Image (tube, rainbow, N blue to C red):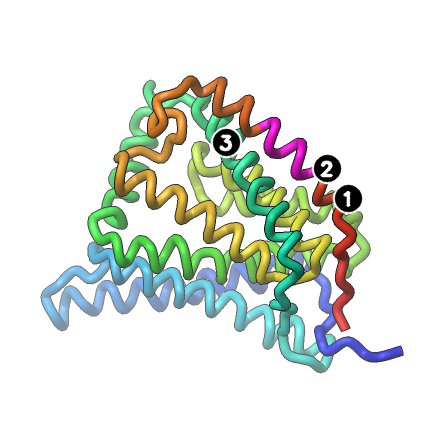
Amino acid sequence: MERSRYPKYIFDWIGGLILFAGYIAGSIAVGFVGLGSKFVFRVDFMQKPWFLMLSNAVVFCLMIAAFDFLMVRPKTGKKLNFNFSPTNFYTYLLIFPLMLGMMFIGEFVTSQIPTTGPFFGDYYEFFENLMANLVDDPIVMIITAVIMAPIFEEIIFRGIIQKGLINKGVEPWKAILLSSILFGIIHANPWQFVGASLLGFVLGLVYYKTKSLLLPMLLHGFNNLCSSILIFYTKTESFAEAFKVSEYIILAIGIVLFSLFYYLFMKKNKVHYSEI
């Protein structure tokens, strides 16, 4: 039997602590740089959109590096490595409508969460102000949301957590569900939690079936690109508001798209690569 060039690592509570330690180390490093900028340059870098972009890159890189050097290499003797192989064109014709359907469903569910009131109102205003800093610089937003986030987040949530759980013996559907929920939690607000968890489920399914991390990265980028375009040109992330249709129509279209292409992708499409 040919040996796989991909390490068969596991993800458990120790792996979770290692990722968290990488997050803390990265956050501390970014904080020191931000504070140093105030004293050395008399400029608050932490208020700059490009600083947020670079900060995310530093934190994610340290999380991945920590897991690689403290978990993967000592236990497998191999460095952290992923399959980024493309697949047949027919598969792409299935997964993008599948993703769009879940985006529509996610929008409807998210729209049911209040944005006003004693708790949700203040929290939503804080979240809106935070996002406004990115919107002020379209180039930084595109780089952050459409390029960097799909790469780093898919490596961590699908490549490390989901795959590591499956390698540990967790049933695939449970691993996909858990990684999706964690993906939602990391967004740290109830509106993105719902959408991110639902979309994470699709990303996890695609990764599990194709074994290629390239595909969920492309789908993740597609979702964030659609959101960015809506924000830039319509000042809203809502398809319903952008196209002036009822949220229930968006939901119905989403259910039809998701159901049809889920069936075609999971039941009819035969692609299922193994990593060697």
Q: First in sequence: mark 2 or mark 3?
A: 3
Image quadrant in which the C terminus is located: bottom right
Q: Amino acid at mark 3?
A: Phe
184 over 168 or under it: above or below: above
Q: Which residue is mark 3?
A: 104
The quarter of the displayed image where residue 160 is located: bottom right
Q: Where does the image place residue 250, in percent across and percent down from the top left?
A: 48, 25
Task: Compare residues 150 and 113 and report the one nearer the observer.
Answer: 150
Q: Residue at x 51, y 41 (%)?
A: 196
Residue bearing mark 1: 268
Q: Classify the position of the N terminus by image quarter.
A: bottom right
User: Going by the image, does 149 lie left or right of 74?
Assistant: left
Dominant secondary structure, magenta:
helix
Report the side of 46 relative to 8 (left or right).
Answer: left
- Asked if residue 170 lies left or right of residue 116, the reply is right
Under circle 2, the secondary element is helix
3 vs 1, front mark:
1
The part of the chain drawn in magenta is: 255-263
Residue highlighted by disc 2:
263
Q: Secondary structure at mark 3?
A: helix
| Residue 119 shows in this picture | no
The residue positioned 15% from the left and 64% from the top of the image is: 38
- Residue 218: mark in rendering: none
Whether pointer 2 and pointer 1 mark residues with C-beta atoms closer than 8 Å, the reply is yes
The amino acid type of the residue labelled 2 equals Tyr
Whether the magenta-drawn stretch holds residue 48 is answered as no
